[in-house]
Image (tube, rainbow, N blue to C red):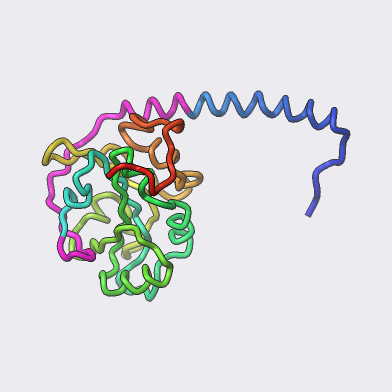
Amino acid sequence: MSLPEIVSREQWRAAREELLRKEEAVRRAREALGAERRRLPMVEVDPEYVFEGGDGKATLLDLFEGRTQLVVHHFMFAPEWEEGCPCCAAFLDQVGHLAHLRARNTSFAAVSRAPFTRILPFKARMGWAVPWYSSGHSDFNRDFEATVPSAGDQVERPGVSCFLRDHDRVFHTYSVYDDGLDGVGTLAGLLDLTALGRSPVGSDHLRLHDEYEN
């Protein structure tokens, strides 16, 4: 492994300032791309998908838990697998406490094709408290391209899909898959994928997760 060049503090500072200008250009481009993402049109979700979770059967509308937005993590866990995907597990480890998302009127849930009886012990083993549902008896994964045909088989694909609720109507606003998930697992990264973005609560309103009002 080659190590960085050793230089003086003045040389390091000059190189850092040059890189900082490039980083700021990337940040501005990322903010412009995020604004364009929020202007994407949305499509109404017509099928009434039925999932299985800790409280029994649930619809996609139920996954919102009364909030305006829903972020779904397409967790790779096929029905025949004994445990979930390690890469998806590492992603879910990053998500952290859901109080920060919920304070921004956004719910989060993991969805996999594995039966819930297999999801439940794996979830307990990993120590996660996030809502996790089985979509094994619906076309949800296929319709949202988290399970895709390949050489006559069905292949799992990691991803995140975002939904918006208007009363009882549900709309699909955005999805991203595979390498597009890099850097997404943080609070800001997830909110930046949604139609409402980081509003209405900005980073200056972050609180300790047990201090948010219900």
Give whichever of 111, 65 is nearer the camera: 65
Q: Residue at the location (26% across, 69% down)?
A: 116
**Quadrant hosting residue 151:** bottom left
Residues drawn in magenta: 31-57
Q: Position of residue 28 (x, y in %)?
A: 52, 24
Q: Residue at the location (31% across, 39% down)?
A: 174
Q: Position of residue 175 (x, y in %)?
A: 34, 43
Q: Position of residue 176 (x, y in %)?
A: 38, 44
- Give the total number of marks visible in the rendering: 0
The quadrant of the image that shows the C terminus is top left
Q: Residue at the location (30% across, 53% down)?
A: 109
**Quadrant hosting residue 58:** bottom left
The quadrant of the image that shows the N terminus is bottom right
Instruction: Give yes or no for residue 188 being in the magenta stretch.
Output: no
**Picture layout, residue 125 above or below residue 93:** below
Give whichever of 147, 83 is nearer the camera: 83
Q: Residue at the location (35% across, 43% down)?
A: 212
**Picture layout, residue 9 above or below residue 92:** above
Would residue 34 be found to the left or right of residue 41 on screen?
Answer: right
Would residue 137 be found to the left or right of residue 141 on screen?
Answer: left
Q: Would residue 180 be visible to someone looking at this image?
A: no
**Picture layout, residue 73 above or below residue 170:** below
Q: Position of residue 142 (x, y in %)?
A: 26, 55
**Quadrant hosting residue 193:** top left
Instruction: Give yes or no for residue 56 being in the magenta stretch.
Output: yes
Q: Would residue 158 be visible to someone looking at this image?
A: yes
